[in-house]
Image (tube, grey):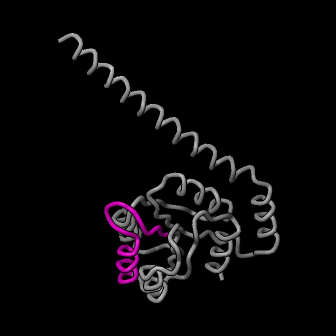
Amino acid sequence: MITALLVVLILIILIIVGIIVSFLEKNKKIHEAETIVQENPKVNQHVENIREGDVNLQKVLNILIVDDEQINLIMLNEMLIKLNCNVKFASNGKECIDIFEEENGNFDMIFLDIVMPVMRGSEAFYLMKKIKPDIKVVIATGFVPGTDEIQDMIKAGAVGILQKPYGFIEISNFISKCRD
């Protein structure tokens, strides 16, 4: 009886330690992502080049990022803040639609992942297009762009594909197009 209790206690301790280690590793990755974006001289130089040459940078854009990976949300948020954007987040397609409806579709651009829990990005895309047909949606994906799902979204009006992992220059190009 005591041996069984000790085994259960050891298992519980191992589970708790595993949860703590997982949490610490995730926070470390998030901190590393923030540091990469903030301290990257290429990013900072590109921001300065944009600021010097783009008078429209003063216009604040409203952006919705939809991704189930927190590290992607943080990295994209850091880049968009440098480009003078207000950012809202959703972690799945359903949340995206809820926020989109709450804000009456008042977004200049949406960065939309495809594979997410609850509702896929493609399903959210078509629902947003019904609500606001001219909404600018960028497909942010790790998938190969040639898949039928992505090609169908492009044909239905997605403005482009942002291949993961993406960088600041790619993001700033989409934002520049949005400001035009």
| Relative image position of residue 21 (x, y in whole percent) | 48, 32
Asked if the magenta segment contains residue 122, the reply would be: yes
Which stretch is magenta? 112-131
Q: Nearer the viewer, residue 139 or 89?
A: 139
Farthest left residue?
A: 1
Farthest top residue?
A: 2
Image height of 19 relative to 74, above or below: above
**Residue 151 horizontal side relative to residue 118, left or right:** right
For the N terminus, which image quadrant? top left
| Relative image position of residue 133 (x, y in whole percent) | 42, 86
| Relative image position of residue 80 (x, y in whole percent) | 62, 63
| Relative image position of residue 161 (x, y in whole percent) | 56, 76
Asked if the magenta segment contains residue 33, the reply would be: no
Q: Nearer the viewer, residue 10 or 122?
A: 10
Name the residue at 53% across, 68% down: 63
Viewer can see residue 37: yes
